[in-house]
Image (spheres, coloured by chain):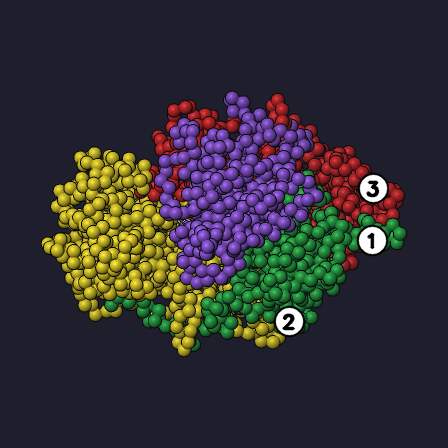
Chain colours: A yellow, B red, C green, D purple
Amino acid sequence: MAGGPQGSGVDTAAVIFSRACGYGGLHIYGKREYHSNIKGLHSYFHIRVSSREVLANSSSVDLLAAFDSETVVRHFHEVSPRGGLIVDERETQKNIFEIPTLPKEFKDDLKIKIEKLKLGETISDLLKYIEGRGGKVFIVPYMGLLRGIADKLGIDNLLRVMPTLNVLSIGISFSILRYDKGLVERAVRTTFSDRPRIAEMNLLALREAFDYAEKAFPEGLGTSLRVLRPSEERILIQGHQAIALGKIFGGCRVQTYYPITPAGDESWFLEAHEVFKIKGGEGSMLVLQAEDELAAINMANGAALAGARAATSTSGPGFSLMVEGLGWAGNSEVPVVITYYQRGGPSTGLPTRHGQDDLRFSVHAGHGEFARIVLASGDIRECFYDAAMAFNYAERYQVPVIHLVDKALADSYKTYEIFEAEGYRIQRGKILDEVKPGEEYKRFKIGDNAISPRVFLGTLGGVHWYTGDEHNEFGHITEHPRMRDSMVEKRMRKLELIDREIPLEEKINFYGERGAENIVVSWGSPKGAILEALKALNREGHSLGFLQVRMIHPLPWKEIREILRDRDKVIDVEMNYSGQLGGIIREKTGIPMSFFILKYNGRPMTSTEVQEALIEILKGRAPERRVLTYGS
Amino acid sequence: MAGGPQGSGVDTAAVIFSRACGYGGLHIYGKREYHSNIKGLHSYFHIRVSSREVLANSSSVDLLAAFDSETVVRHFHEVSPRGGLIVDERETQKNIFEIPTLPKEFKDDLKIKIEKLKLGETISDLLKYIEGRGGKVFIVPYMGLLRGIADKLGIDNLLRVMPTLNVLSIGISFSILRYDKGLVERAVRTTFSDRPRIAEMNLLALREAFDYAEKAFPEGLGTSLRVLRPSEERILIQGHQAIALGKIFGGCRVQTYYPITPAGDESWFLEAHEVFKIKGGEGSMLVLQAEDELAAINMANGAALAGARAATSTSGPGFSLMVEGLGWAGNSEVPVVITYYQRGGPSTGLPTRHGQDDLRFSVHAGHGEFARIVLASGDIRECFYDAAMAFNYAERYQVPVIHLVDKALADSYKTYEIFEAEGYRIQRGKILDEVKPGEEYKRFKIGDNAISPRVFLGTLGGVHWYTGDEHNEFGHITEHPRMRDSMVEKRMRKLELIDREIPLEEKINFYGERGAENIVVSWGSPKGAILEALKALNREGHSLGFLQVRMIHPLPWKEIREILRDRDKVIDVEMNYSGQLGGIIREKTGIPMSFFILKYNGRPMTSTEVQEALIEILKGRAPERRVLTYGS
Amino acid sequence: MAHESSSFRTDVFIDWCPGCGNFGILMALQGALEELGLEPHQVVLVSGIGCSGKTPHFVNAYGVHTLHGRLLPYAIGIKLANPDLEVIAVGGDGDGLGIGAGHFLSAGRRNVDVTYLLHNNGVYGLTKGQASPTLRLGVRTKSLARVNINNALNPVATALISGYTFVARGYAFDFRHLKDLIKRGIGHRGMSLIEILQPCPTYNDITTKEWYGGEDRRDPETGRPRPRIYKLEEEGFDPEVRDPDEAMEKLLRALSKSYEWGDRIPIGVFYKNEQSTYEERIAERLPSYFERPPARQRLSDETGVPLVDLRSLLEEFRVF
Amino acid sequence: MAHESSSFRTDVFIDWCPGCGNFGILMALQGALEELGLEPHQVVLVSGIGCSGKTPHFVNAYGVHTLHGRLLPYAIGIKLANPDLEVIAVGGDGDGLGIGAGHFLSAGRRNVDVTYLLHNNGVYGLTKGQASPTLRLGVRTKSLARVNINNALNPVATALISGYTFVARGYAFDFRHLKDLIKRGIGHRGMSLIEILQPCPTYNDITTKEWYGGEDRRDPETGRPRPRIYKLEEEGFDPEVRDPDEAMEKLLRALSKSYEWGDRIPIGVFYKNEQSTYEERIAERLPSYFERPPARQRLSDETGVPLVDLRSLLEEFRVF
Ligand SMILES: Cc1ncc(C[n+]2csc(CCOP(=O)(O)OP(=O)(O)O)c2C)c(N)n1
Ligand SMILES: Cc1ncc(C[n+]2csc(CCOP(=O)(O)OP(=O)(O)O)c2C)c(N)n1
Ligand code: SF4
Ligand code: SF4
Ligand SMILES: [Mg+2]
Ligand SMILES: [Mg+2]
């Protein structure tokens, strides 16, 4: 873990660190945390490295690199007994209650905590605590190192080399982990590939750090990171990047957005990748910054009618403004895709923090009744494939598709075996390229099933109309009761069609033992922590299965009922207060959840806390609701 | 029933007719139906008159006054065997397929219908059909009568007396019903009380009509309307008026709105009643037309923070735009009231037609989780009391309250015993008028229960902050995990408090036999039709109870579970496709509905069709879902 | 509906009130489309909600009747997805300058090649005559219980300051002039606003046909009405910016003209300034934009295999 | 927080970037409030979402930090419910002219007595530097991957055409001048807009403090920077409408001035025209509005019995 004030390079450090590990054939899982602020408030990244795949973070930290004293204060208790802390020598004498960026409520808690631990009020008291538990503390004279770099570069102003602080701390970290310096250098080079001068400066810093640490800390951390040579090709990728790539791959050609955290990252990534290679040439995506989310959804609807695969991307506050446009899409059978990045709500809530509070809202948003699909990915790989698949669903069924992800997916990093096409095919559903002379075209023709062939705006002979009002087969307004009934039924019966046609493996995943006594039910980002906990517990002899629901709406309730029926315990795990998926399952299957493991403090679940909560339930010691609280 | 083109005075006719009946001590229930159009398309009103209370319409018509041929075409089949039809002699020879305002889909159906009935294509063919079934047809030379009126008033231009056409037809109707002419005159006078010239013209028309009909149709309709002298005081009122009055009575002093059907009527009524009498003086309500619904909800939130009881009023498309503001209110614990008039959705849908499609949306609207109350009135009297009560709930619990009504309630008319205060008290919850010097005020103080004392903006010593972000007790932004948990819990626990404190009789109504084998479950406007059906069926020896749910959220699930548990059949009756209340009940109680009686063609349920559907279920002949279709 | 009829008429019943100015606008629009030699399938009419919003149903061309106030996002989304389409937006004054005012301003900033007909009747027609944002302060139409307490927005001035590159005003009952304006608006490369003075006889008894026509102020000598409306072009007003240097001066002149009201009400073109369109600016980023706009890109081969080169996309993420 | 501190400062950590123009604005605002002799409880600061939107938390007065773009509806709702409050709205350029542009226009139409400080930094600060609606076409700040392809809105011109009765521009780093403008805005009876040129050193490297200060164009002789910013009042510009007849002329002059940019950037008051406020117009409908505004009406007696006379309310519905 590395932490420091926002703007001090924590992000870049995370990237370099993860890349360097990736280059060494290691698996990583990482997650950024930051305040809703541009510069100065606390941010940190938390990375797990392993020779085997890692799916989530745990609750303890083996090596903490603190760029400032606040990081020490916030995380010292997480450093594991055999872990280490790297800290700037200037920080050690600071009084912890004089850190201006610590909010009052944090200080209140802190006071209680240090009283309980019987600690003093300076950073060095906290360092002693770490050491007392068996951890190691590495005190680094960062200023001295910076001065050395400045001197070597012939720079007077220390401020100009300050940005290398993060690379210095990476260097120290990798050095005491005994890692291959060459790989770290490569990571630095790639990261700054478009700014060669900066790259050079940072490479120098890296070398200085390695040199210094080898001398100053000859015994290192104690544990070391060994380089591996896996046989597979690997990528290191974040959730929002995977979604963006899934969109390009899946044929999305118009993306509208209005800036918002954390959805914005995806659109900015797309802007940077708006022109891409296709077989025999070049493809492109139009990425449009709208004036607000009302415009964003409705522009996307318009683009979809014109025949482009079109999407918009947002978070809760933006989605709340898209509700009216979503309803129009539902009524006019527009194949539009909305990528919905949940964050902590309600209202602006916790803009940069995590939550899964918007499930019910995505299912029920919009007045009136209309068919939609709500698809929730549980890991970064699923983000990629679901992003592409969403367009197939949207066009085949002519419905809006909400691709529901969350902040923990959006900006966590993970190493994966490279993504392959995996048989993905673009399926555009029923589309007529032209309407033959003499033929009458009806956009909303009521036929055998709920899907009428589409023509794009501009097609010869296919003139038709759209309206948000109830309409007849041509798309003209009607208030005729029988036509009304037919159109309501046409729209709503799509849900049955979707339920029937989409294969089960695209709708749910089941892990663990099929016949397990106890089933964990969840969706979205807790998946990783659950899988890790499950593995550990089943190894210990417990009997657990895990049902991950991806298609939330229409819910594959028959299959879910089969899976959940007659189990000993059904344990709902979600990042919200009310166990929303649990509610939906009970509504559709009648099966109540026996236990809830919930979390809503804005920080993702760790495998440690999920595992602990599950153990308590399995041991029969748990209350019906258990709220997890790890995180800073 | 009277029908004619929009703009031809159908509305006024409805008012006069209903008033005249009311003055005669009769009970009426009436409902307007009209297209989303200003002038020219078909509209009609459907009124039931009785010496006993009437709660809904039935599916047949005893007397149909047709202002145009379209009305005949649309409603001839509804005229009951012993009923009558009043029609203009000029219309009788018209070809029914040449009526330009009939939409194609209507003509398609009509063709099939008249072929089945073996009828010709003119209006007089339809008249013959009515007569053939035993009905009476009254052919009236309206043009001649109008000319007579014009002559008497010394007016050349026939167009200037045309507006009396509706009163002419009322005159004919009451005359053949042998009703007291004096009462009808009084109704005309009251209706045009602010336009004495028009009143005179219409009174003349009324007399001409009576004179003509007495001579031309000496035998009358056969049935007659007798005047009564009830002992109670009575009012004749529409749903939107009752809500407006409930707001004034309940202390609402700011109402914001953006024009929309059918919610707009309430705000225009309030504008006309913005100054009113209070004990010892004059009160007033500020009614603000906003630039859109985003502004409307947020202005109301602002006014509520300043200390006014504040509300906004809208329908589906507007509510979709209010979702973000609702979330802010939820997060900032703002006591704002939203009156939500449902109409047929989705999107602009059926702007002037009925539906109950927005239940789930009102419960789940808004990203994130926060407490709200959703209160659904089932009749016009409840509209009044719930409108007032909503402000008590909002202020006591510092939550947004959605008062969910529907178009069938909004513009139906009914006679009621005059509304009394019935012990209604204004309860503003915890409010501090001042904060004493030296005391620290925390707007979001976390205390014993979820409610912190409020001070209004501007209170001396009470300076505090609001934000849509997560906040600490002062209202300043926080991202502290523990504070976050506390605030989530503070907001959400209100639901338990509400559930505990609000008495059951404000949350549900139960009608019929407590121990009945079968229970009908419903909410909102179907109540009237259900009650009438229930009475008839229980009279026939069936065993039916009726649970009307008024507090939809938080749902009084424990009590509902008690009521529904172990019944033979639970029958869900709703005006939507998916049986939304049924879904909520199953989610919260685990009890599934055994049958659904649904309707979504945009027209309210009649007691006839509900009764028929229930009989089939009780006789064991019904499918699980039955869709009702009455209406034009 | 049926295959390419030569005319732009449909057989949908037109349910506007008798005497409504919308009839004139509809005719002028249909006339313009015909005279421009466009075919129904090349044209997309996008409308908002209101009486005016029903227009597309009466025109035999692609019709997208959208949400209240959102016609411009739809129009822009459609046009940018397929710039070959002739996209025309049609909506009310409440729609465009009340609930949709944010999009109105934003559209000016973009300069997409869309033509926008704004039906200005001073009221919210379809919801029964409430004051619209163009109704003047202190005015009370017959549909209002009290006088209007809001100031009016001036559509022409609003378009001018937000960047519309063609700004004009027409009159619903001057068929030939309006038809001509619409043709010029469609011909203009960039975002055009045509405000159309539209009498609403049902709710607005202030700015009526008679008032515009000056029937309340007949010449005492001839007895003939003295119309309030006059044509800018007849007074030699030159709206066209021919050189960037004169843009500011012409803009300010147009602004000044836009405030003329009451006794003399100008119609015609207030401002015209051809600049790079949004589409052209996009094409600088996406070189193949005009040949292969989003709606016309091939996505896959015949078997559905995406054309995108997944490997090259993933290259930058490779760590092993 | 604590009881009526004499100052308008809070102890909340101010988390803006070093060098941000917002610091200057905050100080000017606090200074203005103090000098006006207002007390914390009399003032309500209403803000939108953005870096600028955090301002109320740093001011010891009632603070309502609302939704992105919705600050004006809140400000107006609060002010109209209790016109005794001094309501000041504070928000960003994206907030006010992007997502909130519709309310911006509409507020001009109403003329409620609210003072609106618009922090114009040309970017969406809090979401990391995307182009805001005031960023000029073709400009590329360091935060943008490509040049901006939208035209800019001019806040002063937009306020002028929509009816704001006090329109001014200040500069974040001219403390005294800005403080003075804010005092005058608050003093003005009606809707005031004060656009504030606000350098954002983190994302906007175009309109920087140095640029406004003219440090890039020092006088070759003296070596001193030649500031781009100048004060209208120093050039004798008279913004005030003293007679309705001169309103149009002054409006057009203000419009013309508002377009000056580049080498010379005017700050100061562009336009001031006292007219009836919205509150006054309301009071014509509701005679007791100022004595008993909505937030201050008594609703019930001590036992909670509503004061409203239900009988008289129901009278018109009586049929029997
Ligand atoms: C979100 C939303 N709010 C309100 C309405 C109701 N509504 C329908 S038409 C209309 C006003 C129409 O006025 P205008 O745009 O001037 O068009 P006109 O009818 O005058 O042509 C309104 C408010 C709606 N359809 N959607
Ligand atoms: C509905 C909604 N959309 C998007 C956002 C995300 N958001 C937060 S701040 C911001 C932009 C702020 O820019 P500006 O208004 O110029 O303020 P500044 O930060 O520059 O002061 C955006 C888009 C949001 N909070 N709400
Ligand atoms: S209400 Fe007015 S605008 Fe609407 S159709 Fe009638 S006359 Fe035309
Ligand atoms: S991002 Fe810009 S506007 Fe925001 S605090 Fe930093 S410098 Fe100021
Ligand atoms: Mg209008
Ligand atoms: Mg900004």
Quarter of the image for the N terminus of chain C: give it: bottom right
- Which residue in the rendered view is the most extreme toward the left? A219
Tag in front: 2 or 3: 2
Can residue C175 be seen in this snapshot?
A: no
Residue drawn 50% across and 54% down?
Answer: D134
Point out residue A52 in the picture as x, y percentages from the top left corner: 20, 61
> Quarter-wise, where is residue B471 in the image?
top left
Q: Which residue is identified by label 2?
A: C38
Judged left or right of residue D85, residue B587 is: left
Can residue C141 be seen in this snapshot?
A: yes
Closer to the camera, A570 or A313?
A: A313
Disc number at residue B208?
3
The reply to whether the C-beta atoms of the residues labelled 1 and 2 are less than 8 Å apart is: no
Disc number at residue C225?
1
The reply to whether the C-beta atoms of the residues labelled 3 and 1 are less than 8 Å apart is: no
Residue drawn 17% across and 58% down?
Answer: A210
| Vertical placement of residue B417 versus D138, above or below | above
Q: Amino acid at mark 1?
A: Pro
- The numbered mark, 1 or 2, whose residue comes first in the sequence reads 2
Q: Residues within 10 Å of mark 3 (few under 14, many from 20)?
A: some
Ligand 3 has an atom within 8 Å of the beta carbon of the residue at disc 3: no
The residues tagged by marks 1 and 2 sit, at their Cα atoms, a distance apart of: 38 Å
Q: Say which element carries label 1.
A: loop
